Image: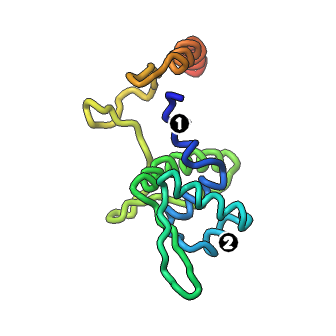
Amino acid sequence: MACSIAKVMAALGDRWGILVMRDLLLGLTRYDDLRRSTGVTNATLSDRLKSLEQAGLIERRRYQERPERYEYLPTGRGRDLALLMQAMVQIGDKWRREEELEPPLRFVGAGSGNGLKLALVDEDQEGLAAEPEIRIVAGPGADELMRWRVELGRDERGARRAATAD
């Protein structure tokens, strides 16, 4: 499928894969810590760790010989998911605020201590995008199905933009 979202989701698998990657990106590396943090069963955690390793998102490294024990570390590809995690945190925090709940996690600048958030950047100008609206177009790698999705949804997206502008 010519879809970047589908590619990432295939690598992550399911909600357990996402939660395991969350914890690995937070710095948890040991099986028992991952199990405690996620509350996942041993069978599911073992399966997700194998899947994430096969997808190239993590590497397994032995840290003890007797008994044999391993730690799990994000690869470069796994560290790429930090952007996805940060986006999910921003959205989750917005939803929590609607429920009058405080954010459970914050991203802050290491030097300044100021909060950080993701923003849209104009890739040609390399600055913050001046227009908050986003137009979706088929990219050079789009297949026929992706072009169909983009075309079919264009009118609906336009109607939603017009409705929210009023």
Asked whether 33 or 135 is in front, the reply is 33
Picture quadrant of residue 110: bottom left
Q: Is residue 12 left or right of residue 121?
A: right
Horizontal and vertical percent position of residue 32: 63, 75
Residue 4 visible in the picture: yes
Q: How crowded is mark 1: few (under 14 residues within 10 Å), some or many (20 or more)?
A: few
Up the image or down, 144 lies above or below 96; here it is: above
Three-letter code, disc 1 = Ile
Q: What element carries label 2?
A: helix
Extreme residue in the bottom direction = 66
Residue sitting at 58 percent across and 54 percent down? 51
Relative to the observer, which residue lies in front, 87 or 113?
Answer: 87
According to the picture, the residue beneath numbered tag 2 turns out to be: 36
| Front position in the image: 125 or 10 | 10
Q: Is residue 158 above or below residue 66?
A: above
Instruction: Tell whether 81 sits left or right of 76.
Output: right
What is the x, y in percent for residue 22?
55, 58
Say whether residue 166 is visible. no
Q: What amino acid type is highlighted by mark number 2?
A: Arg
Quarter of the C terminus within the rendering: top right
Residue at 51% over, 51% down: 55
Eyeballing the image, is 93 above or below 3? below
What is the residue that sits farthest to the left in this orientation?
125
Instruction: Kindly state the secondary structure of the residue where label 1 is placed.
Output: helix
Residue drawn at the location 57% of the way across and 11% of the way down? 155
Image coordinates of residue 60 in percent, x first then y, are 50, 67
In this figure, which residue is indicated by the disc labeled 1? 5
